[in-house]
Image (cartoon, rainbow, N blue to C red):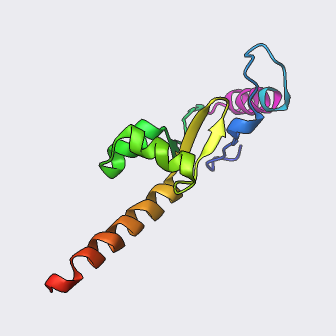
């Protein structure tokens, strides 16, 4: 902790569902926070929201949640299953936006 911004990243896959579970990520986070505060630094904890629920994905794309869920089920939308829930990455949302723009442009190409 030398005055520069330092961070620790904890991927969701490393976090156990049981909050009492003592694991490597918990020890790493505790060590990071302890070292920072002992050095007089303020610790800011944030969430990197890089994936979205089907409902959030639908809102971002102007589609219904059920349309997104059908796309996940038929494989046209790539999603990660975490527990019993699906999450769609920002990169996949960007891909879907680009695909959708291309489809709309193709539909109206004859008008120009």
Please report the residue visible at 60 percent of the width from the left and 31 percent of the height from the top. 43
Does residue 23 belong to the magenta stretch? no
Q: In the rendering, at what x and y percent does residue 44 appear? A: 56, 33
Q: Quadrant of the N terminus?
A: top right
| Furthest residue in direction top, as rendered | 20
Does residue 29 belong to the magenta stretch? yes
Residue 50 visible to the viewer = no
Q: In the rendering, at what x and y percent does residue 9 appear? A: 69, 42
Please report the residue visible at 40 percent of the width from the left and 45 percent of the height from the top. 67
Q: Is residue 19 above or below residue 35?
A: above
Secondary structure of the magenta portion, mostly? helix
Residue nearer the viewer, 64 or 23? 64
Q: Is residue 55 above or below residue 73?
A: above
Q: In the rendering, at what x and y percent does residue 81 appear? A: 64, 39
Q: Is 81 positioned to the left or the right of 34 in the image?
A: left
* Bounds of the magenta segment: 27-41
Please report the residue visible at 54 percent of the width from the left and 35 percent of the height from the top. 46
Residue 63 visible to the viewer = yes
Please report the residue visible at 41 percent of the width from the left and 37 percent of the height from the top. 55
| Furthest residue in direction left, as rendered | 111
């Amino acid at each position: 902790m030398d005055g520069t911004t330092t961070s620790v990243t904890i991927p969701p896959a490393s976090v156990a569902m049981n909050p009492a579970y003592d694991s490597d990520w918990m020890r790493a986070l505790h060590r990071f926070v302890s070292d920072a505060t002992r050095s007089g630094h303020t610790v800011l904890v944030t969430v990197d929201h890089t994936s979205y629920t089907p409902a959030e994905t639908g809102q971002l794309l102007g589609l219904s949640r059920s349309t997104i869920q059908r796309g996940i089920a038929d494989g046209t939308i790539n999603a990660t299953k975490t527990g019993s829930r699906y999450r769609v990455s920002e990169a996949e949302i960007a891909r879907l936006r680009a695909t959708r723009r291309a489809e709309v442009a193709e539909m109206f190409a004859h008008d120009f």
